[in-house]
Each structure stands twice: as C-alpha cells, then as structure tokens.
Image (cartoon, rainbow, N blue to C red):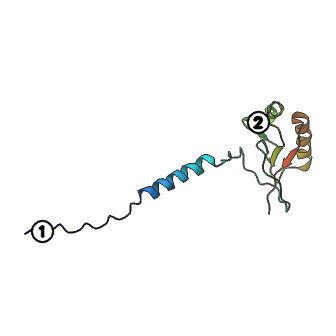
Amino acid sequence: MRIDMPPRRPRGETIIPMINVVFLLLIFFLLTAQIAPPTPFPLTPPASSAELPGAARDVLFVSADGTLAWNEARDAAVWPAIAARTEEGPVEIRADAGLAAATLAAHLKRLREAAGTEARLVVSGG
C-alpha cells in the first residue's frame, strides 16, 4: 500500500521585499533632502504677514547685538568673504528681531557695496 505525502501548504508571502523598498525610499529621501546648517547664534526673526519667495543659498546672519556671521567668517571678516562669493542671486539676511533698524540699514549698505546684489530679509510668518 502506498501512502501519499500530505499536500504542502502554500508558503506565506515574505515581508523582505517590502522592507527593501522602504529602506531604498529612506535612503533616497535622505540623499535628496536639503539639510540646512544650524544658525551660528540664536535668532528670533521679525514678524511679517507677507509671503517671501524661495530661500537663497547665501545667508548673512546678524545677531541682536550686531554680530555678523557668513559661513565660517565672523564680524569684520564677513565683508571680504561676501565680496569673494561666486554665486549669482540675492543674499539672504537672517537678523534677530531685536536688532536696531539703523544697524540693519548700515549692514544693508555695506552688503550692497561688498556683494553688489539684492538682499532679502527673512522674517517669521507670525
């Protein structure tokens, strides 16, 4: 007498291909995301209700006490660094809300002389 083996149950689907796809998407989003560098000192931007166009790549940081930061340059070294920039387009200014308007105006004038381009002041939307 011949006894047949019981039929095998179909194996359930594995989750490995889905995990692979999720990891590939994660890597894709990490590589394509634009990660902004941290500000060199704490800033509270002034409030505005107007919308601004997209952000520029060149950013000049100005603290409430007038301290300047441009990439690695600080204070007086900022102006030669801005004059040597190679990118076209506007310079973005992120100034603290506590900065005096006269100080900001003086920095804008100096920026115009150094860079020869337009400047955009970043404000918060609140």
Query: Which kind of residue does numbered mark 1 sit on?
Result: Ile
Residue 63 location, x and y as percent? 79, 46
Mark 2 = which residue? 74
- Do the residues bearing badges 1 and 2 touch, measured as CB atoms within 8 Å? no
SS under mark 1: loop
Q: Quadrant of the N terminus?
A: bottom left
* CA–CA distance in space, label 1 to label 2: 87 Å
Q: Which mark is residue 3?
A: 1
Q: Quadrant of the C terminus?
A: bottom right
Q: Position of residue 2 (x, y in %)?
A: 10, 67
Q: Is residue 20 visible?
A: yes
**N-terminal-most mark, 1 or 2:** 1
Determine the residue positioned at 71% across, 46% down.
Answer: 39
Indicate left or right for 32 with 59 as reference.
Answer: left
Give the SS element for disc 2: strand
Query: Is 68 left, or right, of 117 in this rendering?
Result: left
Tell me the kind of residue under disc 2.
Answer: Arg
